[in-house]
Image (cartoon, rainbow, N blue to C red):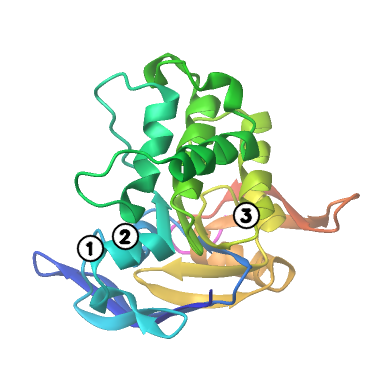
Amino acid sequence: MDVGIEGLTVTVAGARLVADLSVAAPAGTVVGLVGPNGSGKSTTLRSVYRALRPSAGRVLVDGDDLWRLTARDSARRVAALPQERHLEFDFTVAEVVAMGRSPHQGRLDRDSDTDREVCAAALRRVGADHLSARGFLTLSGGERQRVLIARALAQEPKVLVLDEPTNHLDIRHQLEILALVRATGVTALVALHDLNLAATACDVLYVLDDGGVVTSGSPCDVLTPDLLAAVFGVRAHVLEHPVTGAPQLVFSTALDPEGTL
């Protein structure tokens, strides 16, 4: 499904966090949101997965205003992996993934054979079927991320929204998680701090700063030394990855507040 964010404005407690922001994510693409801390990445994504209501603008999924749908219908289209993930009780992995089926069930429904098959397939897809009986709290960070992505896939969404999905993971698990997101084939909106990971994993990047879009385009077009200096305040050299051809950044120095060394 296509995702369109049109003129999004979000104001909380009198503070405007995002202003007139627009993003387009064609069906099947991985679109990255990058920018310094406080630029509006998480706020934008929270509006897409309906955790934060926009003050103005629309979030469209295949032309339908997501905020005009019922919560159940919205959850059948969009699944999210937010930064805040609290599971205080030690559910089994199978139980955590089964939570993703709730948009497809009535309030008192028990898991059907179809539900169990969908959950098992989601766990296999992320390579975590062997963890099914384990307690979620006993898992490593990378294993937990796989299970949470399996839960999102169990929703059978058309859109995945992931806010810093590689936080606190070692480099192997970072690469595996992002490769897994791409392999799902669904439209994905991903906020990432690591620009080299974003360049590798995303088809299109939107650079955010101060609640608005600075520029957008392919990683090669967007990640330039001038842009990195202006938005991130760093001096960087842009190289070409010897295998993928994606831009890779080598940072040398931070710039002072006036933009000089």
Q: Residue furthest front?
A: 113
Indicate left or right for 19 with 222 as reference. left
Badge 2 marks a residue whose secondary structure is helix
Of the two numbered discs 2 and 1 on the same chain, state the one appearing first in sequence. Answer: 2
The C terminus: image quadrant: bottom right
Disc 1 packing (10 Å; few <14; some 14–19; many ≥20): some
Give residue 11's position: percent from left, percent from top.
18, 71
Please state the extent of the stretch shown in magenta in the rendering: 257-261
SS majority, magenta: loop
Tell me whether the residue at label 2 lies in contact with that at label 1, contact meaning CB atoms closer than 8 angstroms: yes
Residue located beneath label 2 in the image: 46
Q: Which mark is residue 52?
A: 1
Image quadrant in which you'd find residue 40: bottom left
From the viewer's perspective, is the residue at label 3 or at label 1 nearer? 1
Of the two numbered discs 3 and 1 on the same chain, state the one appearing first in sequence. Answer: 1
Q: Residue 64 carries which label?
A: none
Give residue 154's position: percent from left, percent from top.
47, 46
Question: Could you tell me if residue 150 is visible in this image?
Answer: yes
Disc 3 packing (10 Å; few <14; some 14–19; many ≥20): many
Residue depicted at x 37% and y 29%:
95
Amino acid found under the numbered disc labelled 2:
Arg
Amino acid found under the numbered disc labelled 1:
Leu
Q: In this view, does 125 lie above or below 49?
A: above
Nearer the observer, 104 or 29: 104
Indicate left or right for 215 with 38 as reference. right
Q: Which mark is residue 198?
A: 3
Nearer the observer, 17 or 257: 17
Badge 3 marks a residue whose secondary structure is helix
